[in-house]
Image: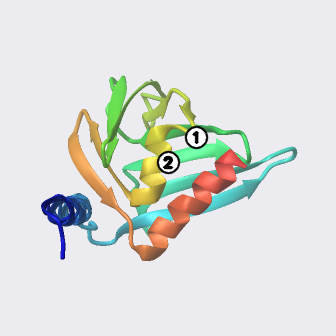
Amino acid sequence: MMTKDRMMMKRVLVLVGGALALSGAANAANAPAMNDGYDWAMRVSDEERTQSAILAYEVTDTDDQPLNFTCEEGGNRIFAGISGNSPDLKAIELVSGDQKLRLNGTTTDADVMPYFSSEEIAGGSAFIRTFAANGWLRMTDDRGTMDMAGSASGKQVIKRFVAFCTG
């Protein structure tokens, strides 16, 4: 026969377990839908002394690439970049799950094809870890907000990129 205390503890455990299950479902439900044709892709280039990689949210075989990340192998430094944005762009905001990151940067080649390059992001930062775990982010720049969710293979590409950058 159960005592009142044991019955109360059992109820509390059931309620806590249910709340945690709902919380996990809510986090999965907050993940944005994929944009038609877009996915995360990674390219590695061999230079004389180091290998570098680019992770881009893009439509395959087009110039449509609203955001990319670059790094050198094992350097633990990641940079965000945007081609063709406003020559006046000074910062972007990235969100993934409960992590938010505001990145200041500079825009170069404003007369030809403006390219925004952010300040350094630490490869082991909470934002990068969360982005790799979630497989999506939301970017806000001077054009507005865009959700960037990956397919199952795109999510694996993000994880490979982070592993490449962090060594």
Pick the quarter of the image with the N terminus.
bottom left
Query: Up-down: is 78 above or below 46?
Result: above
* Residue topped by disc 1: 124
> Can I make out residue 38 in this image?
yes
Please state which of residues 141 and 132 is positioned toward the viewer in this rendering: 132
Q: Position of residue 70 (x, y in %)?
A: 58, 45
Residue 118 is left or right of residue 86, and the answer is: right
> How is the model colour-coded?
rainbow
| Image point (55%, 29%), residue name | 120
Q: Position of residue 26 (x, y in %)?
A: 19, 61
Q: Give the CA separation, mark 1 to mark 2.
A: 6 Å
Residue 43 is left or right of residue 31, and the answer is: right
Q: Secondary structure at mark 2?
A: helix
Q: Which of disc 2 and disc 1 is earlier in sequence?
A: 1
Residue 133 is left or right of residue 25, and the answer is: right
Task: Name the disc covering residue 129, or none.
Answer: 2
Please state which of residues 35 and 135 is positioned toward the viewer in this rendering: 135
Which residue type does callout 2 highlight?
Arg
Q: Secondary structure at mark 1?
A: loop
| Image point (48%, 55%), residue name | 132
Crowd class of label 2 (few under 14; some 14 to 19; many from 20; radius 10 Å): some
Task: Name the disc covering residue 25, or none.
Answer: none
| Image point (46%, 66%), residue name | 155
| Image point (72%, 56%), residue name | 45
Q: Position of residue 12 (x, y in %)?
A: 17, 58
Q: Which quadrant of the figure has residue 123?
A: top right
Count of numbered circles in the view: 2
Contact flag, marks 1 and 2 (Cβ < 8 Å): yes
Residue 146 is left or right of residue 90, and the answer is: left
Query: Up-down: is 117 above or below 150?
Result: above
Which residue type does callout 1 highlight?
Gly
Crowd class of label 1 (few under 14; some 14 to 19; many from 20; radius 10 Å): some
